[in-house]
Amino acid sequence: MKCPFCGYSESKVVDSRPAEEGATIRRRRECLSCQKRFTTYEIMERLPLLVIKRDGSRQTFDKMKLLNGMLRACEKRPVPMQDLENTATEIEQELQNSLEREITSTKIGELVMKRLKNLDEVAYVRFASVYRQFKDINTFMEELTKLLGDKN
């Protein structure tokens, strides 16, 4: 890290602490040449994720779209907003950890359904009905039967 005052390339860390709720690290440094102090911030680099849609088009992953989809499924249901935000963060983290840069919308939908099933079964069925595009009452009943079978 170059000193902003004299340009010397070596400094020592005097103090280090988390900032922005742990998303970054704030470091106080002291230049080994001029002894002046300065602050740096260290952030984790996130690689962009691309979502491959059903029609083959690609767009960047948007956690807010994921959260909005879950919010619609949980409308008028007793699911705390914090649980939905945590779920969206967990899914995003799982996708980042997979090291795949392109993820199908199908895989994302399956991750959402897996988690919604544990949060609220009605929200799960709502999300599944849109996501799986139920064509008629029979496919809807098949999904409900699977859900009831999983509980037993």
Image (cartoon, rainbow, N blue to C red):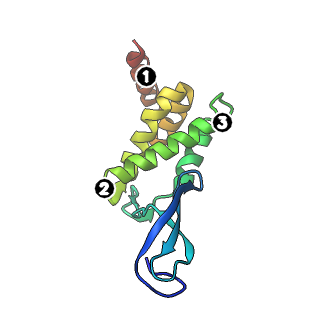
Residue at the disc numbered 2: 99
Q: Callout 3, which amino acid? A: Glu
The amino acid on which the numbered mark 2 sits, given as a three-letter code, is Leu
Query: Which quarter of the figure has residue 110?
Result: top left
Q: Nearer the viewer, residue 39 or 146?
A: 39
Q: Which SS class for mark 2?
A: loop
Image mark for residue 21: none
Disc 2 crowd rating (10 Å Cα; few below 14, some 14-19, many 20+) is: few
> Mark 3 highlights which residue?
75
Q: Quadrant of residue 80?
A: top right
Q: Is residue 124 above or below residue 43?
A: above
Q: Position of residue 112 (x, y in %)?
A: 46, 40
Q: Nearer the viewer, residue 36 or 74?
A: 36
Secondary structure of the residue carrying numbered label 1: helix
Q: Residue at left 46%, top 59%?
A: 61
Cα separation between marks 2 and 1: 31 Å
